Image: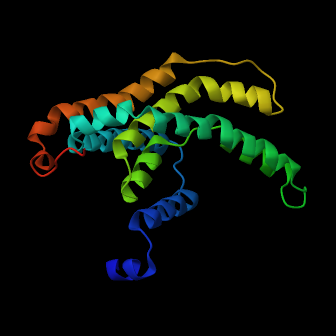
Amino acid sequence: MRKLLDKLSIDGFILAIFAAVGVAALLPAQGRAVPVVDGAVTVAIAVLFFLYGARIHPREALAGLKHWRLHVVILTFTFVVFPVIGVLLRFLPEVLLRPELYAGLLFLTLLPSTVQSSIAFTSIAGGNVPGAIVSASVSNLLGVFITPLLVLALMATTGEVQFHSSSIVDLCLQLLLPFLLGQLARPWSPSSSRSTPRR
């Protein structure tokens, strides 16, 4: 199977994503299974960030935190360029883009990307994983405030903006705390003896 994927130049992680979508579409969590699945997803994401923290050298993490040009570019695309693209989609003929579908696409352009997918794809591409962790985390923290404002400004909706501090706490507990614990546990990680910080 691995040789076939190599010949087709298809990453196994991409296939796993499609497989997960297929399973979720055919066998969605229902009833009592919903909180169990939600808890499993939360634990899986926390473990993922713990492993990233245990693998990345603290100097790499600090360099990713200080790479402000990268973060500015990502934040600009997330909260400026993509919303502009969403607004421009409005001018497509209705035969190509129904109003119902347009509303969904517009809303999608107003959201930051999921942290785990941003980091996973960056890691697969051999990119700057520490920078991706910082940018994706900051994007999601800012999204708690910016996305509702963009929705009110650009979408035909009524209501008021509500900011929930619990969202920020959840992000910190689910993403940042496991990563910091992984950094603390790094001296006992097998990867610490094999990896060297990038210059």
Kindly indicate the quadrant of the structure image that contains residue 152.
Answer: top right
Q: Where in the figure is residue 139, as x and y percent of width and height? A: 52, 33
The one of 1 and 145 positioned closer to us in this rendering:
145
Q: Residue at x 60, y 18 (%)?
A: 163
Q: In this view, does 140 lie to the left or right of 67?
A: right
The one of 68 and 165 positioned closer to us in this rendering:
68
Q: Where in the figure is residue 170, as x and y percent of width and height? A: 43, 26
Q: In this view, does 18 lie above or below 138?
A: below
Q: Can residue 182 be seen in this view?
A: no
Q: Can residue 64 be seen in this view?
A: yes
Q: Where in the figure is residue 199, as x and y percent of width and height? A: 25, 44
The one of 79 and 27 positioned closer to us in this rendering:
79
Q: Is residue 116 above or below residue 5?
A: above
Task: Tell me the quarter of the image containing the N terminus.
Answer: bottom left
Kindly indicate the quadrant of the structure image that contains residue 187.
Answer: top left
Q: Which residue is drawn at 67% across and 43% down?
A: 82
Q: Which residue is drawn at 35% across and 37% down?
A: 64
Q: Residue at x 31, y 35 (%)?
A: 63
Q: In this view, does 189 lie to the left or right of 3?
A: left
Q: Where in the figure is residue 148, as x and y percent of width and height? A: 67, 26
Count of numbered badges drawn on the protein: 0
Color theme of the render: rainbow
Q: In this view, does 119 lie above or below 20?
A: above
